[in-house]
Image (tube, rainbow, N blue to C red):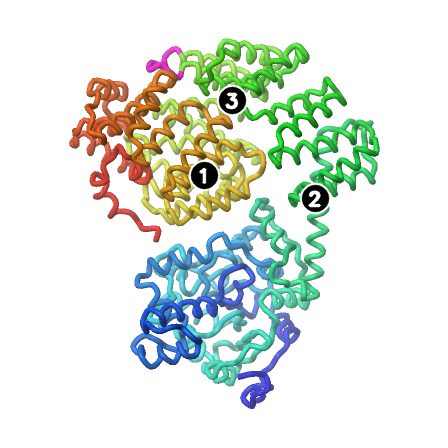
Amino acid sequence: MNDSSPLYKKLESKRRTVKDLADYIKTRSGSVPNYSLFLGAGASVTSGIRTAVDLVDEWRKEIFIRLSSMEYSTAEHAKEWLANNHRDWYESSNEYSSLFEKKFDLPSQRRRFVELQVDRKLPSIGYAYLVELFEGKCFDTVFTTNFDDLINEAFYQFSSDRPLLCAHDSSIKGVSITSIRPKIIKLHGDYLFDSIKSSLNETESLEVNTKEKLIEFTKEYGLIFVGYAGNDNSIMDIIKYLLKQDDYLKNGVYWCKRKGDDISQELFKFLSRDKVYYVEIDGFDELMAELCHELGVNLSLGGSQKSTKRERMINNFIEDEYSLSKNSLINRDIASLKKHTYMQDISSLINELSDNEGISEKIPEIDFRKLLTLDNLIKNKVFDKAEDEIEKLLSLQPDDNMKAKFLQRLIEIHEEKNETEKALEQSDRLIRLDEYNISYCLSRTNLYKEIPDKVKYLKGLFDKFKYSIDIRNEASRFSIKYLEGNYNDNLVQYDDVLDWLNTSLAKDCSLENPAWRLKRDAIVSKYEGDIDKKERNEIIDTLLSEMKSINPTNTNYLGVLTSHISESQDHPKVRELISNLTGLFETTSRSKKKYLLRHLSVLHSCLLDSDEIDDSRKLMKKFIDDYSNEKKESQIAPFLIFKARYYIGLERNVELAINCAKAAMDAIWRNNEIEKICDLLLIDENNVDIVDEYLNALPNDVPETLVLKIRSDMMRIKGNYKESIELLDKAHNSGWDFSGYILSKTYLNLCAENYEKVIEISNESIDKVKSYREKDILIINREVAKKRLGYEIKDNEIRSILSHHQSKGEVAMCAYFLLDDDFNAKKQLKILIEKDFFNYYRFKDWPAVPSQALSQYSIEIKKVA
């Protein structure tokens, strides 16, 4: 039915404007809203979620071709054929649900499909307006049939209020209509639950608690439907019934429909009822903007949360993919956002300059604008234009201060374009401006690709900067990597590194000096090959005592202590430190609490390997319960990663674990947890594309080695072993330590069934690997390859490995499998998986672990798909 049809004209008396609707929302008693919002799938379109119409067209064509064996011609022909030949399941008035049920047999399959549709989608600007309307007390409840998390995400990013989210029938019962917190009620569930309702049979009825809550709210509130088609009988039958009751929906029902959209016969009948009206709108986002305008609410984008996700959301608003700025109100707010973003760029530049400039070197406004323009070009990767602009500016002979700023940006451009030689040339120019500027000299280190080149360069600066701790600390940091990399030349020794760090600490013994942690790292690396760690631990204990004597509550000291205790796997000491830090947390300033929570997260992760499973489970569960309510602190990546490991390791809940990993992608300290985030996401092979997108969005200062290692693992998962090995080689060339590289390379070649190559690499490398544990793993890989080829394995070496590991743990398990000692191998396997179910996902790809040994555990998995 279109605008000119007779039936449409009969509804003219039912037509209301957005301004009318705003006036009705205003006329409330006190501060209690008189309407609830009801959002359907149409509200999610501009957030990038495919419409039901698109999905129906795709499914109809696919199912028609499959069932009819005919060539597809038109949608009308397919509808007619399905209606005539498959009346038992096809319902033309509710195509979405009937086709969805036919397309996917099981609820878990439907849930997985929905998850893929909504995953990583960000709320459109309409949801930002919606949050403002809630902040302005215009609404306090929103019902939705959508499975996405857009509403909740918008509240998290743009409001200090945390909504009550009810996505399951059992959780809805406890929601009070009088609660002042925003309430989000998902009538058909959430994609994280297998009980989502989308099929025809499933949407025929609501759960008891959900139905009762909808009825309870309609006694006090009117309803405003937006983006909803009205195809769910479970909901529409209740609304129709309540409209007949005098005590319900006293404020009426307002049905918002897009201008130009047809009105179906069913919708016509519904709109003809008493207390029901319709409002023509341009779309969900435009409606929210217009309501804000009419109700005197401004788009402030409040909330204290700062994250890359929030930045991406605001960038999406500005980029305006769906041309929402055609609406004058949205256009005005986008213009304001652009100005705000521009001011943030200015603020960032001011911070950069204030870090580097003396009072006497203030930059004139005209030069400031030039830098801002250049930064904007670089930010948007318009490198060639930025380079041309810089060369022009340099040709004008600016003063040395501005010349340095231009050269630094030119170096950045060449780095981005992988033009190392050009970057080094510009670095020479920069250093010639101020030969004794330590910052200029140190920045050059990053331009050298090879670790030995970095070490040589930094050592060459010692005489020039005799009193610089920064030079010695940086030289020590790269020298540790050099020594772990097994390079052939004797460029530096551990004693050299320890001398440099002692010199650094003699010049500055404060706990803020990174030399403390570097010294501990150097000691650990030096004694890596020792089976008996007594001497190493005594030296580190002395170091920790020195730090403690300066300040036992300093976060840097506690960080080094946490690293040492957690890596020692001394569980009594782990528990003791947990107790100490828990007590300290209560008396620590809010600004420092997140550091303590980071340390506590690391320590609790150690308990996943504890033999005292029940006690450790209680301790970890208490940790999550106690600290999840810390609004700011609980949103740090280390805590979210720990929660993910707990959910998968002890509760065997893959969905919750992956959800926490995704939250960590935008949390504080996320860049320190990149590998752990990706390991968790890649449990589900369907997340490879998400990880790829995540890696592409990482900042430039993330080590290339790390990204290459993760991409190598992604290729392994895809079965592309050749490319996976090539990426490993690149990672090693960019600085990955020798032992880690060799172990991964032999593992990948095992997966690829390149058994002779595994034997060759292992024999060539065995004497170059320092750590006894890593040497044992290399032997295991070699012997697995030999066994696969039918060669005789070295029983004596394998039994030595059992001795090294006291016949327990994952390395011992692999040794037992090699010796065909299935009893002891499966015993260790059972212990390890019962301790931490994450081990199942690790072991299932290990060539050393027979697949049949894992088969009994696979049925216990709470499926991702």
Q: Residues within 10 Å of mark 1 (few under 14, many from 20)?
A: many
Numbered disc in front, either 2 or 3: 2
Which SS class for mark 1?
Answer: helix
Stretch of the chain drawn in magenta: 528-535
Q: Is residue 313 above or below residue 615?
A: below
Q: Give the camera-side residue of 646 and 615.
A: 646
Q: In this rendering, is residue 564 above or below 615? A: above
Q: Position of residue 398 (x, y in %)?
A: 82, 31
Give 647 or 419, whichever is nearer the viewer: 419
Task: Kindly check if marks 2 and 3 are in contact, taking CB atoms under 8 A apart as contact.
Answer: no
Task: Please name the residue that numbered disc 3 is placed on.
Answer: 557
Q: Mark 2 belongs to which amino acid?
A: Asn
Q: Earlier in the sequence, mark 1 or mark 3?
A: 3
Read off the residue under disc 2: 376
* Quadrant of the rendered image containing residue 504: top right
Disc 2 crowd rating (10 Å Cα; few below 14, some 14-19, many 20+) is: some
Q: Disc 1 to disc 3, how far (Cα)?
A: 34 Å
Q: Earlier in the sequence, mark 2 or mark 3?
A: 2
Q: Which mark is residue 664?
A: none
Q: Which residue is mark 1?
A: 711
Quarter residue 123 falls in: bottom right
For marks 1 and 2, give the CA distance. 29 Å
Amino acid type of the residue that numbered disc 3 sits on in the rendered structure: Tyr
Task: Identify which residue, 346 or 383, lies in the foreground.
Answer: 383
